[in-house]
Image (cartoon, grey):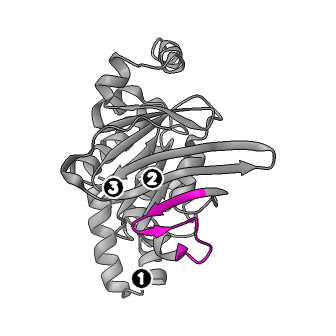
Amino acid sequence: MSISVDQPNGRTPLIEFREVHKHFGKLHILRGVNEKIMEGEVIVILGPSGCGKSTMLRCINHLEKIDGGDLIVDGINLGDPHANVNRIRGETGMVFQQFNLFPHLSVLQNVMLAPMKVRGISKDAAREKGLKLLKRVGIEEKADAFPIQLSGGQQQRVAIARSLAMDPKIMLFDEPTSALDPEMIREVLDVMRGLAQAGMTMAIVTHEMAFAREVANRVLFIDGGKVCESGTPAEFFDNPKEERAKDFLSKILKH
């Protein structure tokens, strides 16, 4: 069971894992995860490769179905086979390692598409919203460009704008800078910093330790499919309690 820090003001969790299990065949990926994420909280999920970090994220928007326990997202229990999964996906933006932009559409068209198709808003309203979001991520001058004409960092910022176009309550980031050249990483992290400062609820899997220390309200350390340590960035980075966490940090921080 995870070690949970006290949550302020008695707020209801926006996301709650209750003894959640996930299997891939014989592999037991998540092993009884218990965790709460509050509205407006920025969670960074750390751990070694294969420990279940990305699976935990993908379960939140039902890209992966849980095999046991309860996962409650904005009041909907994804452990219920009758859960309104489309509503959760509509309120949950996800940014992956790869940008997954439509190559035949312009940057602005990529951002406009989902609000028009899913939310049913007009083309003019979608265009106005798209331009505002491109400005928010610092790439409004590329509105008429195509993805192939952009750098990796620019494409990832378009992917973030596309997710924001659905007005999500939750943003999930699965190693969003891992496919980028080093000089492109900062521009994407700057956009994510802005979202955190604006109060967006965020769960982030990343290997950017300085960024994690700066923006997270709380760090979760996962090993072997379990959250074995949870605390503020200062607590985790300066005084980790678990030997496995100490070993992880000793290896990753020396690089």
Mark 1 lies on residue: 119
As shown in the figure, which amino acid type bears the numbered disc 1? Arg
Q: Position of residue 214 (x, y in %)?
A: 28, 32
Query: Between residues 16 and 96, which one lies in front from this camera angle?
Result: 16
Is 77 included in the stretch rendered in magenta? yes
Query: Between residues 68 and 192, which one lies in front from this camera angle?
Result: 68
Q: Residue at x 30, y 48 (%)?
A: 41
Answer with left or right where residue 52 lies relative to residue 186. Answer: right
As shown in the figure, which amino acid type bears the numbered disc 2? Leu
**Of marks 2 and 1, the one in the foreground:** 2
Mark 3 lies on residue: 139
Q: Position of residue 74 (x, y in %)?
A: 39, 66
Residue at mark 3 to residue at mark 2: CA–CA distance: 21 Å
Q: Are marks 2 and 1 in contact (CB under 8 Å)?
A: no
As shown in the figure, which amino acid type bears the numbered disc 3? Ile
Q: Residue at x 37, y 69 (%)?
A: 165
Residue at mark 3 to residue at mark 1: CA–CA distance: 24 Å
Q: Earlier in the sequence, mark 3 or mark 1?
A: 1
Quadrant of the image occupied by residue 53: top right
Label 1's element?
helix
Range of residues picked out in magenta: 69-85
Q: Residue at x 81, y 45 (%)?
A: 26
Query: Between residues 105 and 207, which one lies in front from this camera angle?
Result: 207
Answer with left or right where residue 187 lies relative to residue 105. Answer: left
Answer with left or right where residue 162 lies relative to residue 101. Answer: left
What numbered label is drawn on residue 172? 2
* Above-or-below relation of 244 to 186: above
Quadrant of the image occupied by residue 160: bottom left
**Of marks 3 and 2, the one in the foreground:** 2
Q: Residue at x 58, y 56 (%)?
A: 69
Label 3's element?
loop
